[in-house]
Amino acid sequence: MGNAAMHIARTGLDAQDMRMRVISNNLANVNTTGYKRDRAAFETLAYQTVTAAGAASTSETKYATGLNLGTGVRIQGTARIDTQGSLATTGNSLDLALDGDGYFQVTLPGGQLGYTRAGNFSRSAEGLLVTSEGYQVQPGITVPEGATSITIGNDGTVSATIANQTEPSQIGQIQVAIFPNAAGLQAKGDNYLIETAASGAVNLGIAGQDGRGNIRQGMLEGSNVNVVEELVDMIETQRAYEVNSKMITATDEMLKYVNQNI
């Protein structure tokens, strides 16, 4: 029984250590554009049934409650919290923020499609609308040479004043991607997510329609990490880790007592 108690406490240490990693990552990305905080989800390990509820206790009676012994805990997974981050005005015409649900779609190296909430875009030497790493935004937008006064509407319509023209011309439209289960997207790093079987197929469409958020030009979405909340979770995790550590120490002392005195 003593070894079992040590094993259970060890699973608690492992789970709290992983939760602390999740909290640390949230705090590290408190200033990351478009970052969405993660939350660790716990689940119990398998139970050992010593006495089943309803089993016969005598020839005439049955146990009203059973005897089930748990074997510990583990991290079931991490859930991304997709609440809206605060919007900050930058004044840069190619900085875009999504006010509502959805993601910008970009082409990653190798042709894979990635999705991001970070809309700090710029123009490449060829006039393409790209991310800071040079990945092209999809559908592709090409800004003609010499174009000025680039405006992007809430629906993603991109217009610019082209040389020798007095009226702005529409040069493309940025679309917004949504998924049946956005929580199923896999984080890839560099602010990008990729589609998985759990997320469902991407659905590209016009911003502001069918549940998609509106596009805000000249703004960027900040992280949705609440520092105070994360610090409270960190203290809670630290205390839970200490309790599990004390459980191992207490169990070890009990076993030591048994070995020396019985």
Image: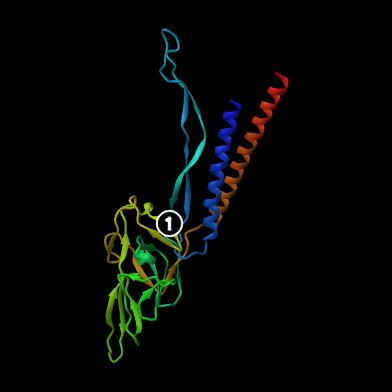
Q: Is residue 108 visible?
A: no
What residue sits 57% from the left and 50% below the top? 234
What residue sits 34% from the left and 52% below the top? 199
**Most distant residue in the front direction:** 110
Q: Position of residue 65 (x, y in %)?
A: 45, 21
What residue sits 35% from the left and 69% below the top? 215
User: In the rendered image, which quarter is residue 119 located in?
Assistant: bottom left
Q: Position of residue 232 (x, y in %)?
A: 57, 50
Vertical arrangement, residue 248 with respect to residue 191, above or below: above
Q: Secondary structure at mark 1?
A: strand
What colouring style does the render use? rainbow
Q: Is residue 128 visible?
A: yes
Relative to residue 118, is residue 151 drawn left or right? left
Q: Which residue is mark 1?
A: 187
State the residue in front, 19 or 155: 19
Vertical arrangement, residue 204 with respect to residue 44, above or below: below
User: In the rendered image, which quarter is residue 24 located in?
Assistant: bottom right
Amino acid type indicated by mark 1: Ala
Vertical arrangement, residue 199 with respect to residue 214, above or below: above
**Picture quarter with the N terminus:** top right
Relative to residue 191, is residue 163 drawn left or right? left
Q: How many marks?
A: 1
